[in-house]
Every structure is written in structure tokens, then in C-alpha cells.
Amino acid sequence: MTDPISVTILGATGSIGASSLDVVAQSHPDGPSFEVVALTANRNVDDLARAAIRTRAKRAVIAEAGLYSDLKSALANTGIEPAAGAAAVAEAGDMPADRVVSGIVGIAGLPATLAAVRRGACIALANKESMVCAGQLLTEEARRSGARLLPIDSEHNAIFQVLDRKERVEKLILTASGGPFRESSLQEMASVTPEQACKHPNWSMGAKISVDSASMMNKGLELIEAAWLFDISPDRIEILVHPQSIVHSLVAYDDGSVLAQLGLPDMRTPISYALSWPARMPLPGLDRLDLAKIGRLDFMPPDPQRFPALRLAREAATAGGSASVVLNGANEEAVAAFLQRRIGFLAIAQGVERVLNELHAGLPASLATIEEILEVDRLSRECTLRMLKLAA
């Protein structure tokens, strides 16, 4: 009987958090058992409290400090310690746990992720924005502390599973579903609604990541993340549209071999691999891949005219320094404006490009601290909001 794997879940009430909680709840005689150290959420007190009680977590943290009393009341007489505020979320990442699931959306997840890295934890990383904005800082801190970054984005997890001879790799191939507008014209895309953009054909995700998938900015962010995670130049990372979302990514080797990881589009598979690594754990309740039933797997290059976010991300990855931080901050604000119906869908990438053009040349070539990164993020958001206001 092996000891339980202790787990902290940052962002427990989001889509990654929900899938992680489901994996943690799995019980199988051939699999590991888990105990929950801490759970965090942004504002969803009810779901956080229910999850903490269900998993017998030691601590539950709500990011919105003003909701502390609500959380305390919800956890009364449970023995679970309530906490609130941004500092408490970061402290949750620093609590002793075998695995820390980094599932907070956006750069808001960076402080807690960095705290876990500095502690030397194994981080099950879904918060791609942390790597996009602070890839150099996080990888340097991980080398210093001995932390492991175990990706749970399906694409990066797929590469992680089949990348065994790094020195023989020619290129990495990230697959993308193409989102709900893969076959739409620019004219049709100009008038899409947030509801249409959030209706992903294959995956069930939160609003922000669904919009990023629809614009393919998500794949651009994943390109930058992959460059840091696997220490490979962006020009050796290819993106292919694969509508079925069965082949999650591929690694091409210099002997002509191309290795791929396949599976149904269910985040519980990559999450389970990161939580149980270096072993694998059984997931008996998941549907199994039936290739004969699927019948065909299609691949095609993305259209750069309809999805300019890919070009912007490549340019930011090549430029280095502040560019990726500006790209991410501007995109987060533009996506929020789209979801609030203040701008159109195509204006997301257009706005990001304008902010990059205005800001990047005047910003530092490299960012060494989290304070510098957050300051560039602040400037990019201010610039984006100013441009959106002028365009209104």
C-alpha cells in the first residue's frame, strides 16, 4: 500500500479544477489514492466550500478578500481552514504537497505557480499564461529548486509522453481543432457572438480559453509555452489543424519517425498522467478511443489570414523579452471586452497587434523578476483599455 499523493488545486472551481477533482476522486485497487491539501477559487464560494468538504481539504482559499466571511460561514464546524486574498492564494501554492495543479486562468495564476516552483514542487501545469509571461523565470527557478513542470494542457502533455530522445528531435507538432470558426469566412467571423465563440466543437472549457481557441490565440500561447517547456526554438514548432482532436500532438525525430499521443478529448487523461507520474493510473470510467468508429483523421495548415493571432504569437516568441507579456495582457483585456460585447470578434487580434506595435519597442529586452513582469502586464492592459475606449 503506497502513501497517498497529496494535492493542491489552484483554480478548483474552473474546468481544469473540476476535472482534477474528478481524477482525485477516482478509486481503483491498481491506482494511487489522493489527499487534498488546499483548494483555491476566485469568487465561487459555494462550489469551493462544497469541494473542500467533499475532499476533506485542509485549507480553502477564496481570491476575493471581501468574500472571506462567506467562506468562513460555509466551512463552519468542518475543520477546514478558510483563507482569502491574493497573498493567501500564493501561500496555497507554497503549502507542502506532492502535486500542485496550476489551473488558474490568466496571469493571475503566476504568483501561486511561482511559489510552488520555488518550493521545489511537482507542478501539474495548465496555466499556460504563466509560462508565456514568465517562462524564463519559472524554468530558471525550477532548475534552482528542483521543481518539475508537468504539463496538463493536452498538447504539451502529449509531447511530454512521447519525447524520449530530445537530442534527436527535428520539430514538435501542436494540433489544433480549429475551433468553431474553422470553416467560417472573415465576413461571418466579423459578426459572431460570444455564445458562438464559446461553443467549442470538441472540448468543454471556460469562456476565456474557448474564445482563445476560436481565435487560435490559444494555440499561439501554447507555441510559446512549448518553446519554454521543451527548450526548443519557436521555428521548430509547427501547428496543424486537426478537427477531430484525437491526435493531441506529435514529435518528429531525425530518423523520420513521428510519434503521437492519441485519445478522446477529455482533460482527465492528461491530468491523471501528471498527478500519477512517473506511473500511470487507471481511469475505468472514461470512454475509450475507437478509431474504427471515428473512421478518419484529418490534418491541414491553419489559415493565417483568418487567424492572425498565430502570426502575432510567433512574432512575440521570436522577439522575446516583454513581447509575450504584452501579447498575453492585451489578449486577456480584448477577450474580456468581446465577452462583454464591447468589441467584435475580429477586433481581438487587431487590438493585440496595435498594442504590440505601440508598446514593445519601448519595453525592456528581458524581464528578470515577477515585479518586472507584472509591471509590463499592467502597462499592456492600460494601453489596451485606452485603445478600446478610443475605438468605442
Image (cartoon, rainbow, N blue to C red):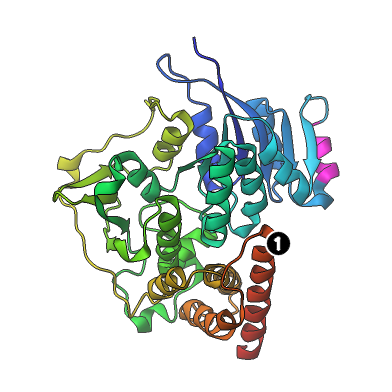
- Classify residue 217 by image quadrant: bottom left
Magenta residues, as a range? 68-75
Q: Is residue 88 left or right of residue 221?
A: right
Which quadrant of the figure has residue 98?
top right
Does the image show residue 162? yes
Label 1 is placed on what type of residue? Glu
Q: Is residue 121 above or below residue 297?
A: above
Which structural element holds mark 1? helix
Q: Residue at x 62, y 30 (%)?
A: 97
Q: Quadrant of residue 102?
A: top right
Q: Nearer the viewer, residue 17 or 312?
A: 312
Q: Position of residue 9 (x, y in %)?
A: 60, 38
Q: Is residue 174 left or right of residue 109?
A: left
Which residue shows up at 55% across the image and 74% down it? 338
92 inside magenta stretch: no
Where is residue 210 shown, x and y percent of the image?
A: 47, 60
Main secondary structure type of the part rendered in magenta: helix
Residue identifier under label 1: 371
